[in-house]
């Protein structure tokens, strides 16, 4: 079976419980739509666990990009500040949930830090998968600056990790094409404000706000079934 989850945000206990609930095995495959890190206490631990899983495809989100950018700008010690702009950006990131990520990252050996940097750098920002004539486009935030005639490879990196989808609008007129996204907690999308997967108008939104007290969700491509773990 193929599953999709998103926005684990350092909730390692819930992530491991989700894998157990799925009876996740070597014959299965999991797609994670970014933001395994930030906000939750075990951010780096979650990311390192994912990196060791051979049957997991990681698609980066905006929080992953922030970590990557700061490593690139500041070095593996996150301390090579060249101007006040990067210093204030770094402080803002910590206030926006990056503090546990920073602390966990700096507790690692240098080789381990480099592995994390390379992992995020080399991750593809979107994936396409198919099942029984249905096409699923997977990315963290969906697709910004959308034009139906535009090829996916023509979008920028940031079109897939930043911004908010209009979940009241069908993007692809083909009813067998779905955009699967995280990034925006579903209790902001659903009219009932429940932390459950949202499925309407060609959207499948799966960030159910685990780190905020909601659920961690996994959507199964083959069955359409959703599995939840409560915070």
Image (tube, rainbow, N blue to C red):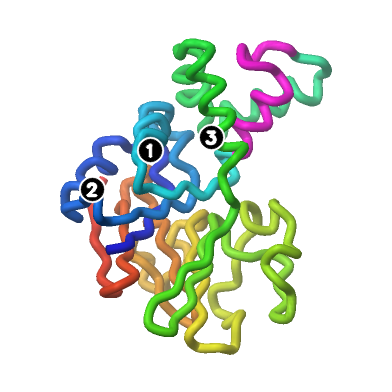
Residue 130: % across, % down: 44, 74
Q: Does residue 118 lie above or below 202 as drawn?
A: above
Q: Which residue is label 3 attached to?
A: 119
Q: Does residue 169 lie above or below 139 as drawn?
A: below
**Image: magenta residue range:** 65-80
- The crowd level at tag 2 (other Cα within 10 Å; few <14, some 14-19, many 20+) is some
Ranked by sequence position, the earlier of labels 3 and 1 is 1
Which residue is pictured at 49% across the width and 77% down the height? 135
Which residue is pictured at 49% across the width and 80% down the height? 202
Query: Foreground residue, 112 or 17?
Result: 112
Q: Which secondary structure is most common in the magenta stretch?
A: helix
Q: Quadrant of residue 81?
A: top right
Check if residue 78 falls in the magenta segment.
yes
Q: Which residue is label 1 attached to?
A: 50
Q: Does residue 147 lie above or below 65 as drawn?
A: below
Q: Is residue 230 visible?
A: no
Could you say whether the residue bearing mark 3 is in a helix, strand or loop?
Answer: helix
Which residue is pictured at 63% across the width and 57% down the height? 160
Q: Quadrant of the N terminus?
A: bottom left
Residue 27: % across, % down: 25, 55
- The crowd level at tag 3 (other Cα within 10 Å; few <14, some 14-19, many 20+) is some
Residue 100: % across, % down: 45, 24
Q: Which mark is residue 19?
A: 2
- The crowd level at tag 1 (other Cα within 10 Å; few <14, some 14-19, many 20+) is some
Task: Left or right? Give the position of 180 relative to 48.
Answer: right
């Amino acid at each position: 079976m193929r599953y999709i989850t998103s926005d684990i945000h350092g909730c390692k206990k819930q992530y491991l419980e989700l894998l157990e609930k799925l009876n996740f095995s070597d014959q299965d495959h999991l797609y994670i739509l970014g933001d395994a890190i930030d906000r939750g206490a075990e951010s780096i631990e979650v990311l390192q666990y994912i990196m060791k899983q051979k049957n997991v495809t990681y698609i980066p989100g905006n929080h992953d990009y922030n970590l990557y950018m700061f490593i690139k700008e500041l070095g593996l010690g996150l301390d090579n500040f060249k101007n006040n702009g990067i210093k204030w950006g770094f402080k803002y990131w910590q206030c926006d949930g990056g503090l546990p990520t920073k602390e966990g990252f700096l507790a690692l050996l240098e080789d381990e830090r480099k592995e994390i940097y390379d992992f995020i750098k080399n991750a593809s920002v979107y994936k396409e998968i198919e099942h029984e004539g249905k096409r699923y486009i997977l990315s963290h935030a969906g697709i910004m600056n959308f034009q139906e005639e535009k090829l996916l490879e023509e979008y920028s990196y940031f079109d897939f990790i930043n911004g908010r989808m209009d979940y009241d609008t069908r993007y692809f007129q083909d009813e067998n094409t779905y955009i699967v996204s995280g990034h925006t907690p579903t209790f902001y999308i659903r009219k009932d404000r429940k932390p459950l997967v949202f499925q309407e108008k060609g959207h499948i939104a799966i960030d159910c706000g685990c780190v905020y007290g909601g659920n961690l969700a996994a959507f199964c491509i083959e069955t359409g079934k959703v599995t939840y773990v409560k915070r």
